[in-house]
């Protein structure tokens, strides 16, 4: 380690640090984007789609559902609420 320090000096130890910061920041940001998109998809399913499907299958009361009235309306309803 001492030999490297003698060859490149104190400032040489920091070469490439900005590139590494940008690289790690970008990768971390992409990981968070993937995580948030998965969480939002799961929330959308449980809050909007599942109650409608349960209503269709089991006849739950209307106040339990916030989604489409039939599964045929599901695609239109999802496109309208995105």
Image (tube, rainbow, N blue to C red):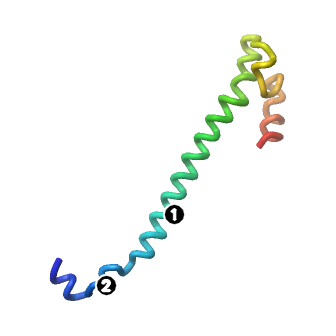
Residue placed at 44% from the left, 76% from the top? 18
In which quadrant of the rendered image does the N terminus lie? bottom left
Residue 35 percent coordinates (x, y): 54, 46
Q: Earlier in the sequence, mark 1 or mark 2?
A: 2
Q: Is residue 79 above or below residue 9?
A: above
Report the Cα–Cα distance between label 1 and label 2.
Answer: 24 Å
In which quadrant of the rendered image does the C terminus lie? top right
Which of 63/80 is in front? 63
Q: Is residue 71 above or below residue 57?
A: below
Q: Is residue 52 above or below residue 3?
A: above
Could you tell whether 71 is left or right of 16 in the image? right
Element type where label 2 sits in the image:
helix
Q: Are marks 1 and 2 in contact (CB under 8 Å)?
A: no
Residue placed at 61% from the left, 46% from the top? 37
Residue 15 percent coordinates (x, y): 36, 81
Residue placed at 22% from the left, 88% from the top? 7
Residue placed at 65% from the left, 29% from the top? 46
Q: Is residue 43 above or below residue 12?
A: above
Which residue, as the protein is rendered here, is positioned at the far left? 2
Could you tell whether 8 is left or right of 49 in the image? left
Element type where label 1 sits in the image:
helix
Q: Quadrant of residue 61?
A: top right
Q: Residues within 10 Å of mark 1 (few under 14, many from 20)?
A: few
Could you tell whether 13 is left or right of 52 in the image? left
Q: Residues within 10 Å of mark 2 (few under 14, many from 20)?
A: few
Residue 64 percent coordinates (x, y): 75, 19
Q: Which mark is residue 26?
A: 1
Q: Which mark is residue 12?
A: 2
Q: Quadrant of residue 51?
A: top right
Residue 33 percent coordinates (x, y): 57, 52
């Amino acid at each position: 380690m001492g030999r490297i320090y003698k060859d490149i000096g104190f400032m040489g130890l920091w070469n490439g640090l900005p590139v590494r910061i940008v690289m790690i920041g970008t990768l971390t940001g992409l990981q968070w984007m993937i995580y948030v998109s998965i969480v939002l998809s799961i929330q959308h399913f449980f809050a909007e789609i599942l109650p409608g499907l349960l209503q269709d299958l089991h006849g739950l009361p209307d106040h339990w559902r916030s989604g489409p009235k039939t599964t045929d309306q599901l695609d239109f309803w999802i496109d309208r609420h995105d």
